[in-house]
Image: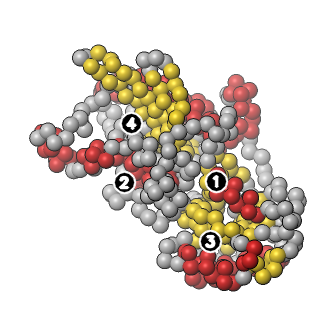
């Protein structure tokens, strides 16, 4: 599959610049990173560079030419940085989008130049009309149509950028009939198209998986290095008493749970920590990743991953605090993290000292704990299945809101839960404009150009 991914703000900017009141064609160049897997090649838009009026040598309602000096300046922005270039231009009509012979000739020349200077396999084009868009990438002998364009923001919008679009259909309308009443057959089909990553399959992660499976989602990447322990039985969905008597990985328990609901589910089981680069790379084809881990080191690499690959992350957690042996507080959080929102570091959800401690070799960490240089890093935290399930429900509902476009898109991206008072409210953490992760000059859309985690 070949696709292009945008942030919502970049996509809106591009459309604004491509359609002007004078009725003439406009153009822009998009600097992009690449996420290349066995199944997919995704071009990740990092920056939109509109062509200014004085950079055209010709600009009409049916044709345009961009000055070579401006094209050279765009190429210069990419040289030495590893970026590719997507060309974008408009036909200012309301007709179906269709490349002209002039477009073919012009893009064939440009792609050849881009590939020679910047390297092959990271360039493409988009053509917009007021109601349509199509796209393509250069092939060995001819252009290859794009399979998908995805716009990522407060909602995720994916569409096939071709004239011949085949409607997707839900696979099990009878099983999901009550849900179809809420979302419609198209909404149900959209859910079934999603590939979901779940990192951490304990109390919250197993509850997330159980709910997603019954929603009809069938494509999962499940990440957890741990073997089931007897103490997990009280809170891990899908586990059985018999699991306490023999070694079994949590990934296998959740796979058993999901296939009991959907026998044809497509599951990838990763019995390793997500801080490993090789594990992270297997999340690149996911539409959304749920972060259900209980440590800040894992959260920190998922935080980077979300911006680097334009991959929405739904991060969740629950904390029960005690005083004198009694429950003093129950607090939970669900944060939608990724393009156009503050990262977990800007939202103050990552503790640098904990990350440092958790990333230490086990022997060194235990020595520092013994000497009281580190506190609470290896201590088990209280956990109760009902509160875990509450937070998992909030997190899965967040997926429904962004995947199906339910509700007001201007809502804040973080939900806070007070379990003692039984209330939930939303907040919007402010991003640091100089953050090296979530700012415009941070990691957004760089894809495979940089290692996410040096640990392997």
The residue labelled by disc 2 is: 276
Q: Is residue 105 left or right of residue 330?
A: right
- Residue 210, how many percent across, how many down? 51, 30
The residue labelled by disc 1 is: 9
Q: Quadrant of the N terminus?
A: bottom right
Query: Between disc 3 and disc 2, whose residue precedes?
Result: 3
Secondary structure under the numbered disc 2 in the rendered image: loop
Give the quarter of the image for residue 296.
Answer: top left
Query: Between disc 3 and disc 1, whose residue precedes?
Result: 1
Q: Give the label, 3 or 2, closer to the camera.
A: 3
Give the quarter of the image for residue 45.
Answer: bottom right
Query: Between disc 3 and disc 4, whose residue precedes?
Result: 3
Badge 1 crowding class, 10 Å Cα cut-off, few under 14, some 14 to 19, many 20 or more, is: few
Q: Could you tell me which residue is drawn at 81 percent across and 80 percent down?
A: 58
Secondary structure under the numbered disc 4 in the rendered image: helix
Query: Marks 3 and 2, how far apart in space?
Result: 30 Å
Secondary structure under the numbered disc 3 in the rendered image: strand
Q: Are marks 4 and 1 in contact (CB under 8 Å)?
A: no
The residue labelled by disc 4 is: 250
Q: Could you tell me which residue is drawn at 29 percent across and 43 percent down?
A: 354
The residue labelled by disc 3 is: 85
Query: Marks 2 and 1, how far apart in space?
Result: 31 Å
Q: Which residue is more in the foreground, 320 or 176? A: 320
- Vertical placement of residue 372 versus 382, above or below: below
Q: Could you tell me which residue is drawn at 62 percent across and 50 percent down?
A: 152
Query: Between disc 2 and disc 1, whose residue precedes?
Result: 1
Q: Is residue 236 visible to us here?
A: no
């Amino acid at each position: 599959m070949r696709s292009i991914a945008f942030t919502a703000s970049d996509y809106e900017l591009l459309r604004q610049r491509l359609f002007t009141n004078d009725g003439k064609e406009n153009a822009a160049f998009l600097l992009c990173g690449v996420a290349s897997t066995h199944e997919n090649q995704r071009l990740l838009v990092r920056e939109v560079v509109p062509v200014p009026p004085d950079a055209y040598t010709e600009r009409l309602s049916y044709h345009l030419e961009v000055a070579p000096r401006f094209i050279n300046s765009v190429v210069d922005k990419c040289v030495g940085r590893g970026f590719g270039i997507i060309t974008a231009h408009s036909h200012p009509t309301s007709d179906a989008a269709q490349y002209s012979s002039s477009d073919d000739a012009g893009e064939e020349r440009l792609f050849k130049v881009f590939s020679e200077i910047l390297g092959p396999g990271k360039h493409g084009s988009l053509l917009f009309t007021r109601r349509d868009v199509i796209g393509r990438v250069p092939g060995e002998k001819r252009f290859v149509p794009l399979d998908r364009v995805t716009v990522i923001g407060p909602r995720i919008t994916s569409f096939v950028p071709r004239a011949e679009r085949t409607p997707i259909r839900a696979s099990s309308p009878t099983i999901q009939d009550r849900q179809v009443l809420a979302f419609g057959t198209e909404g149900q089909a959209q859910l079934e198209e999603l590939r979901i990553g779940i990192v951490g399959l304990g109390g919250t992660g197993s509850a997330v998986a159980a709910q997603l499976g019954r929603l009809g989602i069938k494509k999962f990447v499940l990440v957890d290095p741990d073997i089931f322990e007897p103490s997990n039985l009280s809170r891990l969905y899908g586990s059985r008493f018999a699991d306490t008597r023999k070694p079994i990985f949590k990934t296998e328990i959740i796979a058993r749970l999901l296939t009991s609901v959907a026998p044809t589910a497509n599951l990838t089981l990763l019995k390793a920590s997500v801080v490993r680069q090789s594990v992270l790379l297997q999340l690149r084809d996911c539409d959304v990743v749920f972060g259900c881990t209980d440590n800040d080191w894992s959260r920190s690499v998922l935080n980077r991953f979300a911006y680097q690959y334009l991959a929405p992350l739904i991060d969740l957690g629950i904390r029960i605090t005690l005083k004198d042996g009694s429950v003093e507080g129950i607090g939970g959080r669900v944060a939608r993290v990724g393009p156009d929102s503050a990262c977990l570091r800007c939202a103050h959800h990552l503790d640098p000292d904990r990350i440092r401690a958790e990333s230490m070799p086990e022997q060194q960490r235990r020595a520092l704990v013994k000497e009281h240089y580190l506190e609470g890093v290896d201590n088990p935290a209280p956990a109760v299945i009902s509160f875990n399930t509450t937070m998992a429900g909030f997190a899965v509902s967040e997926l429904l809101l962004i995947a199906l476009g339910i509700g007001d898109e201007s809502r804040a991206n973080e939900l806070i839960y007070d379990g003692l008072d039984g209330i939930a409210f939303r907040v919007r953490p402010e991003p640091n404009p100089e953050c090296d992760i979530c700012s415009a000059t941070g990691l957004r859309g760089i894809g495979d150009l940089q290692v996410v985690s040096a640990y392997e």
